[in-house]
Amino acid sequence: MFDIFRNRLEITGILTTITALRISAGRSIEPIGKDLPVIKDALGQPLIPGSSFKGALRSRLESFVRGVDDRFAANPAIESEWSITHDRMNGENGIKKEVDKELEGYPEKERAAKKDQLLTDKIINETDLISRLFGSPWIASKFQVRDLTVVPDTWFGQYQERDGVSIDRDTETVADGQLYDFQVVPAWTKFEFRAVVENAEDWELGLLMIGLHQLQTEQITLGGGRSRGLGVVKLEIEKMRWVDVEDNPQFLLQYLQKLVIADETAYEDAAKYKDEWVSQLTDYLNKQISQKSINQTIH
């Protein structure tokens, strides 16, 4: 269906590298370059891709909800483990065919308008909980993270260089030709964090609050070399601005007017809703578990 604006959460803060950070750009092609340089922006400054941040957060939340029920988080890396595979979507007995069959029960003039609604409902019904927030091949992500750019005063134009070595598992000695060097971003470098969530359910916001808390307490690491102690980061949230138009057209118009003139009263402080959103998440998961038990009893 065409999107209808319902709510928006804007999050800003600072991400600090507690230990050195290595998000590799792949092997260098420069004759005298480092073997494994870090990702940089166009000015040669360190950069944390929003996709890397989002992927680490998603992975942690997947592990949590799988601990409750493995159905709640599909494996995005393996198609056969997706909640909706290409065959399930497009095959002879797929969702699209099911929708086409259901449309036969509607007058022809209503089918075009009804098709999108039926297809959307079926996709959402079969999509795992994590993908509803973070996206899948069939659903756009509700959670968007900008690339994290360095705070200039915290980085002094230098990368650290470290040596690495590959070990031969049979001889437990250095493998021939496997010495290499790599760059890291120094500890205590700060990056600007900006993220937006739109049209999220309360339980989805609760899921996100748990993930952000993990980052605030240094429980999620980024990049490579984590077994070496690299990638420990800490998120400090400065603002969480929230607006919920509550299906109220007049309120939406007021919000848009305030937005244009940069009136901060367009938003509420979302911090006061954190506990409520987390409570909504636990209630939602309990209902999902109860429904599963009922279905297993029936069958």
Image (cartoon, rainbow, N blue to C red):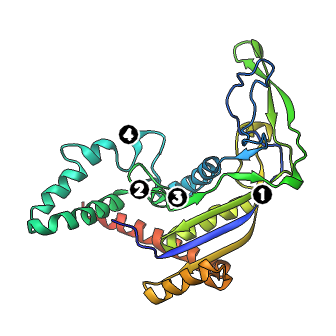
Mark 4 → mark 1, Cα distance in angstroms: 35 Å
Whichever of labels 1 and 2 marks the residue nearer the N terminus, that label is 2
Residue type at tag 4: Ser
Along the horizontal axis of the image, is 1 left or right of 35?
Answer: left
Q: What residue does disc 4 label?
A: 80
The residue under the point 44% across, 56% down is: 140
Q: Nearer the viewer, mark 4 or mark 1?
A: 1
Q: Tell me whether the residue at label 4 lies in contact with that at label 1, contact meaning CB atoms closer than 8 angstroms.
A: no
Q: Position of residue 96 (x, y in %)?
A: 23, 52
Crowd tier of the residue under label 2, counting other residues whose Cα lies within 10 Å: few below 14, some 14–19, many 20 or above = some
Whichever of labels 1 and 3 marks the residue nearer the N terminus, that label is 3
Foreground: 150 or 161?
150
Along the horizontal axis of the image, is 48 left or right of 115?
Answer: right
Asked if residue 160 is positioned above or below residue 166 in the image, the reply reads: below
Q: Position of residue 220 (x, y in %)?
A: 70, 52
Asked if residue 257 is positioned above or below residue 63 in the image, the reply reads: below
